[in-house]
Image: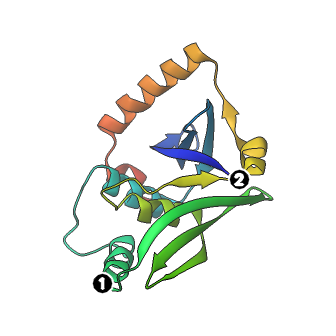
Amino acid sequence: MIQMSLVGVRVEVPTNQPIVLLREEEGQRYLPIFIGPPEATAIVYALQGMETPRPMTHDLFKTVLDDLAVELQRVVITELHDGTFYAEIELGGNGETRRISSRPSDALALAARYPMPVPIFAAEAVLDEAGILFDQDEEEAQIEEFREFLNEVTPEDFAAE
């Protein structure tokens, strides 16, 4: 397993399809995962610390876990089959650890709601198949472009047309 960090959410041009972007902690590969607009909104809200008048699904799930004294210990992107990513969330509490199947977008939206970073991992085979390596100059330019995007993006940008 390779430890990853959540870079953020961007919109792929020209399709306007949201992508969540992960980066190797100790490497230069990125893992882009296409996600739906609602999940993109949920991740952006959490990353920007935005509160909604009523809890979103991922907020509700975190509240339930907190009330049950269960902790999200890590997110693992486990597989990639026919263009579909698979993930698991690892939950711990009451002396037990359980792994539950999840869509990567939901797992990451939940993880983004914790004040301390939740460890994110990807299977080596997933990174070998879908990881992208940028050269250093291109990487720095893309990171700067992505930072500018994050500073300007709003959840409404992910609304379905």
The percent position of residue 87, horizontal first and vertical second, equals 63, 64
**Residue 25 locus on image (x, y percent):** 54, 38
Amino acid type at image mark 1: Asp
Label 2 neighbour load within 10 Å: few <14, some 14-19, many 20+: some
In contact (CB < 8 Å): disc 2 and disc 1: no
Query: Is any atom of residue 161 visible in this view?
Result: no
How far apart marks 2 and 1 lie (CA) works out to: 31 Å
21 displayed left or right of 67:
right
**What's the coloring here?**
rainbow
What is the total number of numbered labels drawn onto the structure image? 2
Q: Which residue is drawn at 35% across and 86% down?
A: 68
- Report x, y in % for residue 22: 55, 44
Which type of secondary structure does the marked residue at label 2 adopt?
loop
> Residue at the location (71% across, 44% down)?
127
Label number found at residue 33: none
Vertical side of 138 occupied by 102: above or below? below
Q: Looking at the image, tell me whether mark 2 or mark 1 is earlier in sequence order.
A: 1
Secondary structure under badge 1?
helix
The residue positioned 36% from the left and 74% from the top of the image is 62
Compared across the picture, whether 82 is left or right of 19 comes to right
Position of residue 146 measured from the top left corner of the image (x, y, whole percent): 44, 31
107 sits to left or right of 65: right
Question: Mark 2 highlights which residue?
Answer: 123
Quarter holding the C terminus is: bottom left
Q: What residue type is labelled 2?
A: Ala
Numbered badge on residue 67: 1
Please say whether residue 37 is visible from this viewpoint. Answer: yes
Task: Reply above or below: 141 against 53.
Answer: above
